Amino acid sequence: MNFTKKALADFTRYFLEFAYAGTDFHGWARQPNALTVQESLETCLTKLLGYPVGVTAAGRTDTGVHARSMFGHVDLPNPPENMEKTLYALNSILPKSIAVYRMWPVKAEAHARFSALQRCYTYRWLRHKNPFEDSWAWRCRHWPDFQAMQQVSKGLLQVRDFSAFCKANHDAKTTICLIHSIDWQWDAERAAMSVRANRFLRNMVRAMVGTLMEVGWGRMSEAEFMDVVRSGKRTKAGVSVPARGLTLEEIVYPQGLWETGL
């Protein structure tokens, strides 16, 4: 839909919080001849509301990556009369792998992507087959030394340029990111690494984890790992780990952004 600036002034911006299991989709963003989360969500919103609806998300996730808490915004000319009934109806027609938790009016300047301050991703490992968790973790036959990986990952808190972990031929304007924290948990059967940053590059977490795995398997030293990071070359880093182990966990916005736009 194309609207004039005058027409847009009559619209109300709504934020949505939703989640999805990425297994069934080729990522968030629309693609020709491939099912995506964006296409599914926009199609159902359009069907429900009776006019074309576009969703701007807080970011893109790759094929197979999950989101436990994703945000997006839509501009609606006719606000729903009963939000509870609208959400119930929307979730009834959405695929079972997508759920919209809430939807509310916000200030016109609130932007799902550009207003976000932080994002948090978690990568998970499993040691043995588990029918309840396999879709959300990488079942890793050769269990790495997670303590060594944790130690090496501390150096990433001092890094600003993450070109070495950025997908080739990317369209990012900058490869500068600020990692706020990296937290680890592991035992004999499961492991998880959560990384929080102001922004992430395409494929960044999976490439970062893949390179840390080289350390965990004893194939790369801490000094060699940092040399890879400083090189800025994706070809020197490890392979990207499987997408099913990665989940977008949280997005942080400024206080006051949630204030109603009505």
Image (spheres, helix red, strand yellow):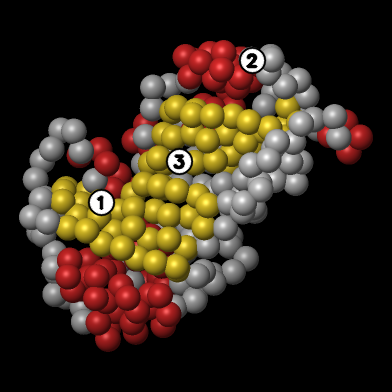
Name the residue rendered at 68%, 40% in the picture.
Answer: 259
Name the residue rendered at 15%, 33% in the picture.
Answer: 131
* Residue 17 picture location, percent across and down: 52, 35
Position of the C terminus, as image quadrant, is: top right
**Toward which corner of the image does residue 48 lie, by quadrant?**
top right
Q: Residue under label 3, please give it.
A: 69
Q: How far apart, in angstroms, are the residues tagged by discs 1 and 2? A: 39 Å
Other residues around mark 3 within 10 Å, as few (<14) / some (14–19) / many (≥20) = some
Please name whichever residue, 232 or 249, is drawn nearer the observer in this view of the structure. 249
Given contact means CB atoms under 8 Å apart, are the residues at marks 1 and 2 in contact? no
Kind of residue indicated by mark 3: Ser
Q: How far apart, in angstroms, are the residues tagged by discs 1 and 3? A: 16 Å
In terms of sequence position, does the residue under pointer 1 or pointer 2 come before the other?
Answer: 2
**Toward which corner of the image does residue 63 lie, by quadrant?**
top left
* Residue 103 picture location, percent across and down: 59, 29
Q: Residue under label 2, please give it.
A: 82
Kind of residue indicated by mark 2: Asn
In terms of sequence position, does the residue under pointer 2 or pointer 3 come before the other?
Answer: 3
Other residues around mark 1 within 10 Å, as few (<14) / some (14–19) / many (≥20) = many
